[in-house]
Amino acid sequence: MRIESRARFSLAQLPTPIEKLKSLSRELGGPGLMIKRDDQTGLALGGNKTRKLEFLVGQALEQGADTLVTAGAAQSNHCRQTAAAAARAGLRCELVLNGTKPELPNGNLLLDELLGARIHWAQRSEREGKLSEISDELRKQGSKPYVIPVGGSNGVGATGYVLAMMELAEQLKGMYRRVDHLIFASSSGGTQAGIVVGAKVIGFKGKLHGVSIDKDDSDGATYECELADIANETAKYVGFNAQFTAKDFNVLYDYLGGGYGVVSDLERAAIRLLASREGIMLDPVYTGRAMGALLDLIRKKAFRSDETVLFWHTGGAPALFAYAKDLI
Ligand SMILES: Cc1ncc(COP(=O)(O)O)c(C=O)c1O
């Protein structure tokens, strides 16, 4: 593997902690529950994008870029972390956000502004066009933009989660612990693709469960095919000789509720439970839904009580404030 020789810009405080959710495990009557705190990666309130951005910004700097350009939802954690990464690396940041400018920015959007990003608003269907338009304009002005795909989900970004699995393996070895199931939110795919590649690299024996946040399975295995493409790109980037197909990805599609960013009782209950029993803040869009899925699976006895399940907290709590109305 040539992961060590790939350009990387240090942004994260690693390793992120692994904690036991003792009260919750006891209350639910097992399985053993652990949480990997990637909400504490340290970059402008943390989250899974920090790990991806280490490699994306590394490549941007290697290519001599002076501006990061990316897109996402108005409450995108990815955009907030990209704005922070740009600030740290001395780069400019242009964000294309879905929708229209609200009167008062809140949550991630407030942070985007404080971090100094330039924000452009566009309807989702016009997003790709807007990204190209901004990049072309920057080039005309003599700038060197580096365009990051939505969620930072390509082979370069997902490399961060190959390393994250190597980090996890080291931590579990030090704790003399085995994990039977790993569960996490999955949306643009870089996290799951990186975890699956990393699992193969370290010979992880447990089961991996990606909880779909916004993709449905009405088109057959479309999302799994996308995941396989990112995984193959990642394996190539890190010099790991393996081929991935849609069959390598386990995606749970039962928790989509009303769609992306629509908060229901599933997320509300999960957020309150983790907050009130463990003092851990989940987010309304991703980790609230993924934890809701885990709690449902536990209630349905999908795991044996002597098994250990690790929930990978991927961040997002800054969005809580923007979703206040849906949470109380
Ligand atoms: C908090 C949080 N968790 C999970 C995810 C999903 O990660 P990925 O887009 O790599 O699938 C995101 C993506 O935006 C996120 O912001």
Image (spheres, rainbow, N blue to C red):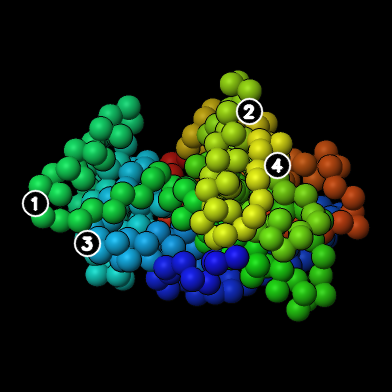
Nearest to N terminus: mark 3 or mark 2: 3
Q: Is disc 3 placed on a helix, strand or loop?
A: loop
Marks 4 and 2, how far apart at CA: 11 Å
Number of the label disc, if any, that sits on residue 221:
2
Residue 159 in view (yes/no): yes
Q: Which corner quadrant holds the N terminus?
A: bottom right
| Residue 74 vertical position relative to residue 142 in the rendered view, above or below | above
Verify CB contact (< 8 Å) between mark 1 and mark 2: no
What is the secondary structure assignment of the residue under circle 1? loop
Q: Position of residue 79 (x, y in %)?
A: 35, 52
Q: Amino acid at mark 1?
A: Gln
Task: Judge the density around disc 4: few (<14), some (14-19), many (≥20) Cα neighbours within 10 Å.
Answer: some
Q: Is residue 261 left or right of residue 267?
A: left
Pointer 4 or 1: first along the chain: 1
Q: For numbered disc 2, what is the local secondary structure?
A: loop
Kindly identify which numbered label has been placed on residue 141: 1
Q: Earlier in the sequence, mark 3 or mark 1?
A: 3
The residue at which mark 4 appears reads as 248
Q: Position of residue 42 (x, y in %)?
A: 46, 70
Whole-percent x, y for residue 96 in the image: 27, 43
Question: How far apart are labels 3 and 1 at the CA level?
Answer: 12 Å
